[in-house]
Image (cartoon, rainbow, N blue to C red):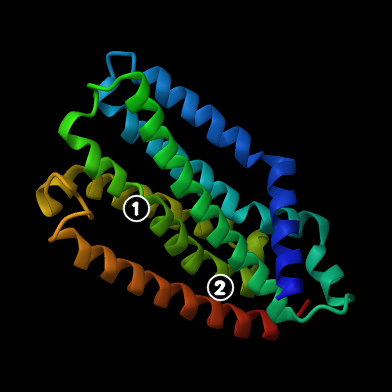
Amino acid sequence: MRNALRMMRLDTRSVNTRNNVLLIYLVTDLITVALAFSPLAEGAFLIGFGGLIGGSGACLITPFVASTQRGLDAFYAMLPVRRRDIVNGHYLFAAVLSLFMLMNTWLIVILVLWLRPTLFGADLPILLSFAFVGPFMLLMMSSVQYPILMRISYEKAPYLIFLPIVAAGLVSGYIGGSSTDLLGRHGFFSPRGYPLLGLGLVGGAGIFLASLLLARRLYARRDL
């Protein structure tokens, strides 16, 4: 576990060196707040939410881009670190980034609510619950991307890796447009929403774990 934490911190450093996560989130938050006072006020949250998914999706693959450019996989092979710990570190990074996005999304909602109390109105509960969609999408993106990256590297499949990001944007946009009809005004925090939230969390965790196990096997067979 200790080695996995070290790998996760290494991923975080590589991301912050290229496209600082905090800076991406800060800029997105400021743009969202500014839009809340513009003619696009009603769509400010969804615009900011889309920016968070795009920025976070790019951060997911940044460690692999850095690894390809610097030949880190061959370097890791010379260290007393198990390959499974390297994979665990990458997945732990994805999980931490997803949690960070959830916290930041709630922060945006609370901040805009404080600055413009009447903007959200009755939509506030569904916006708070909609915040779960972003982290879920990130975990699903990593579940699709990481086994591919572990097996054939970013250099050999750069465009294939971006397809999950596009798919996540389309799916989240659809959910955003139909969430009120599907779940009602209280979103996931409602009698109708709780079963869907629970099913989504359990299903997402199962897919993420299956992806982790697959990535371990693929990376163990990879010729570094």
Q: Residues within 10 Å of mark 1 (few under 14, many from 20)?
A: some
Q: Which residue is mark 2?
A: 147
Is 192 displayed left or right of 114 in the figure? left
Taking the spot 41% from the left edge, 28% from the top edge, the residue there is 111
Taking the spot 16% from the left edge, 34% from the top edge, the residue there is 122
* Residue 222 visible (yes or no): no
Q: Residues within 10 Å of mark 2 (few under 14, many from 20)?
A: many
Q: Nearer the viewer, residue 94 or 143?
A: 94
Question: Which residue is most to the top?
Answer: 38
Disc 2 residue type (three-letter): Pro
x then y, percent, for residue 218? 61, 82
* Residue 83 visible (yes or no): yes
Q: Quadrant of residue 44?
A: top left
Is 67 displayed left or right of 204 in the figure? right
**Does 42 appear above or below 154?**
above
x then y, percent, for residue 23? 62, 33
Secondary element under disc 2, as helix, strand or loop, is helix
x then y, percent, for residue 67? 75, 59
Task: Quarter of the image for the N terminus: give it.
Answer: bottom right
Task: Quarter of the image for the C terminus: give it.
Answer: bottom right
Q: Nearer the viewer, residue 194 or 165?
A: 194
Disc 1 residue type (three-letter): Val
Question: Gap in Å between the C-alphas at discs 1 and 2?
Answer: 22 Å
What's the mark number on residue 133?
1
Taking the spot 46% from the left edge, 72% from the top edge, the residue there is 208
Secondary element under disc 1, as helix, strand or loop, is helix
